[in-house]
């Protein structure tokens, strides 16, 4: 299926503008023309191996755009599930709902969903009700937009918290444009691993060069890496690697990127499954697969130093990374605590119990025993930009997603506050 883009009409349009305006317009149309070329080169591939049971959405789960009071934030997967009613449409979700919805909607493995939910409750939500907001919490406290918890620098298609001047949650037009270019230049013309690894390389070098507050904490740094494999593994039409395709139609719809063909910018629109039909992957993709793929296929394109002890040694493998996650609970900053040791211990105990229930534990993995030492917080946590230090971004732009707008037409090499 080809789109109706007519590239031939562009130069003719440019001639309609006189003088300087015409030159400017021609330049713009030249750039836009390249982008439209990239996009049209990506259209038309469909999945060859599909199982009708995996058609999504199922009936009764129609897309509905979020209203102004519905909480949406940096995770396209969860935003989409709320927009289709697999999660509460108001965006206030709990642990059990998310484990079930992520499996049903995308076939995320329960172990991976559990690890993510544990961190979401602990760092962004409420432990009594095991719940959290997909965007910002009440009075902008907590929620998935909270920085350096699960939300992290070097994201596939969001700007860094500091350079985005607090906007770490809207899809960035300039980054998605880069992603499309890399897809168009890839051998398979898709959003597969070659494209996403190159994208990780470019985004991480940008952050290293321009973001003085690049904090790559143990858990968020892992999320940063694996989020790049989530594009092909979860957002493909059908099962990636066995007939499914990480095509433009699927990815752009699911992450809410809508091209304005006149300006060449991507508007951020509510995340939804493609209207022409889409099939989720047919097998679960869980923690072991995600970590293996992330560290063998994404991360090698630029080895950003991260506080994972085994990095660069032969001891780095999925077991040791899972042990790091298990023990690394010590490095997170629970939302409500402000460092009260007894409360922290109770929360860590709750969290470890959840992980053990899905098979991530010291005995199974052979992790060292001392998981609840006193190193609760990341070293230097009270320096500016650290979890307990002053916020280097003066203007807070936390809040829920506002859709149908363009964010970041140019790369923010310094904080872009408007
Ligand atoms: C199970 C609970 C989940 C939680 C708590 C969660 C949380 C988050 C958070 C906080 C981010 C922001 C990270 C960043 O700054 O880059 C994020 C990003 C992301 N999440 Fe989720 N997520 C979950 C499940 C999922 C699922 C099921 C999918 C896919 C089907 C998914 C796909 C993604 C992707 C692709 C990104 C990167 C966004 C981008 O920059 O393009 N997540 N998630
Ligand atoms: C997904 O694949 C199916 C089966 O080939 C096809 O009918 C459908 O149009 C594809 N959807 C997208 C968004 O590419
Ligand atoms: C959103 O919340 C505000 C403030 O509570 C309220 O005035 C408004 O009616 C709500 N809008 C919708 C669409 O529910
Ligand atoms: C991972 O590395 C550790 C430490 O070198 C080793 O004990 C363990 O057997 C390895 N596990 C796997 C699955 O390779
Ligand atoms: C903490 O800060 C000190 C002084 O700025 C620095 O020398 C040290 O490397 C920092 N430690 C970590 C783990 O970042």
Image (spheres, rainbow, N blue to C red):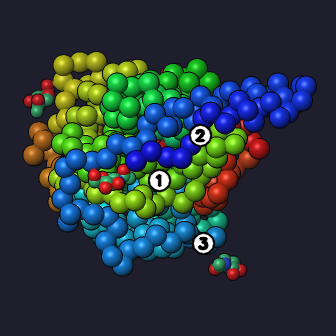
| Residue 309 in picture, x, y percent from top left | 30, 27
Please give the name of the residue rendered at 80% of the width and 30% of the height, measured from the top-left corner.
15
Q: Secondary structure at mark 2?
A: loop
**Residue 317 visible in this rendered orientation of the protein:** yes
Quarter of the view holding residue 324 = top left
**Residue 179 visible in this rendered orientation of the protein:** no
- Gap in angstroms between the C-alphas marked 3 and 2: 35 Å
Rendered position, 90 above or below 357: below
Rendered position, 290 above or below 213: below
Q: Which mark is residue 6?
A: 2
Q: For the residue with label 3, is its CB less than 8 Å from the closest atom of ligand 3? A: yes
Q: From the viewer's perspective, tell me whether residue 204 is left or right of residue 25.
A: left
Figure quarter occupied by ligand 4: top left
Mark 1 or mark 2, which is nearer to you? 2
Q: Secondary structure at mark 1?
A: helix
Quarter of the view holding residue 6 = top right
Q: For the residue with label 1, is its CB less than 8 Å from the closest atom of ligand 2? A: yes
- Earlier along the polypeptide chain: callout 1 or callout 3? 3
Q: Are marks 1 and 3 in contact (CB under 8 Å)?
A: no
Which residue is tagged 3?
Answer: 67
Q: Nearer the viewer, residue 46 or 357?
A: 46
Q: From the viewer's perspective, tell me whether residue 254 is left or right of residue 345.
A: right
Please give the name of the residue rendered at 32% of the width and 64% of the height, measured from the top-left corner.
56
Q: Secondary structure at mark 3?
A: loop
- Earlier along the polypeptide chain: callout 3 or callout 2? 2
Q: From the viewer's perspective, tell me whether residue 299 is left or right of residue 335.
A: left
Which residue is tagged 1?
Answer: 253
Mark 3 or mark 2, which is nearer to you? 2
Q: How many other residues sit within 10 Å of disc 2, few (<14), some (14-19) or many (≥20)?
A: few
- Gap in angstroms between the C-alphas marked 1 and 2: 21 Å
| Residue 81 in picture, x, y percent from top left | 40, 64
């Amino acid at each position: 299926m080809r789109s109706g883009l007519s590239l031939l009409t562009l130069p003719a349009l440019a001639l309609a503008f006189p003088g300087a305006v015409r030159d400017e317009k021609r330049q713009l149309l030249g750039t836009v023309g390249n982008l439209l070329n990239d996009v049209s080169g990506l259209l038309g591939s469909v999945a060859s191996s599909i199982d009708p049971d995996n058609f999504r959405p199922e009936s009764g789960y129609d897309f509905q755009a979020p209203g102004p009071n519905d909480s949406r934030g940096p995770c396209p997967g969860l935003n989409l599930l709320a927009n289709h009613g697999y999660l509460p449409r108001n965006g206030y979700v709990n642990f059990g709902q998310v484990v079930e919805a992520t499996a049903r909607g995308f076939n995320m493995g329960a172990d991976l969903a559990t690890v993510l939910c544990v961190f979401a409750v602990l760092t962004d939500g409420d432990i009594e009700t095991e719940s959290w907001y997909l965007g910002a919490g009440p009075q902008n406290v907590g929620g998935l937009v909270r920085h350096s918890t699960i939300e992290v620098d070097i994201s596939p298609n969001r700007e860094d918290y500091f350079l985005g001047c607090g906007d770490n949650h809207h899809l960035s037009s300039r980054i998605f444009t880069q992603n499309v270019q890399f897809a168009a230049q890839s051998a398979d013309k898709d959003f597969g691993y070659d494209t996403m690894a190159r994208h990780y390389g470019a985004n991480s070098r940008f952050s290293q060069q321009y973001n003085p507050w690049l904090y790559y904490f143990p858990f968020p740094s892992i999320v940063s890496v694996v989020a790049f494999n989530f594009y092909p593994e979860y957002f493909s039409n059908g099962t990636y690697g066995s007939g499914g395709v990480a095509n433009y139609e699927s990815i752009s719809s699911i992450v809410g990127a809508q091209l304005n063909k006149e300006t060449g910018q991507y508007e951020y629109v509510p995340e939804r499954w493609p209207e022409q039909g889409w099939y989720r992957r047919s097998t679960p993709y869980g923690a072991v697969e995600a970590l293996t793929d992330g560290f063998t296929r994404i991360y090698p394109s630029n080895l950003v130093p991260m506080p994972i002890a085994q990095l660069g040694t032969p001891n780095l493998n999925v077991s040791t990374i899972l042990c790091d996650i298990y023990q690394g609970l010590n490095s997170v900053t629970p939302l409500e605590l402000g460092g009260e040791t007894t409360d922290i211990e109770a929360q860590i105990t709750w969290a470890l119990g959840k992980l053990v229930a899905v098979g991530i534990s010291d005995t199974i993995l052979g992790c060292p025993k001392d998981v609840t030492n006193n190193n609760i917080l990341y070293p230097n946590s009270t320096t500016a930009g650290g979890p307990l230090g002053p916020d280097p971004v003066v203007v807070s732009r936390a809040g829920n997603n506002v859709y149908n707008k363009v964010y970041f037409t140019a790369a923010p090499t310094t904080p872009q506050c408007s």
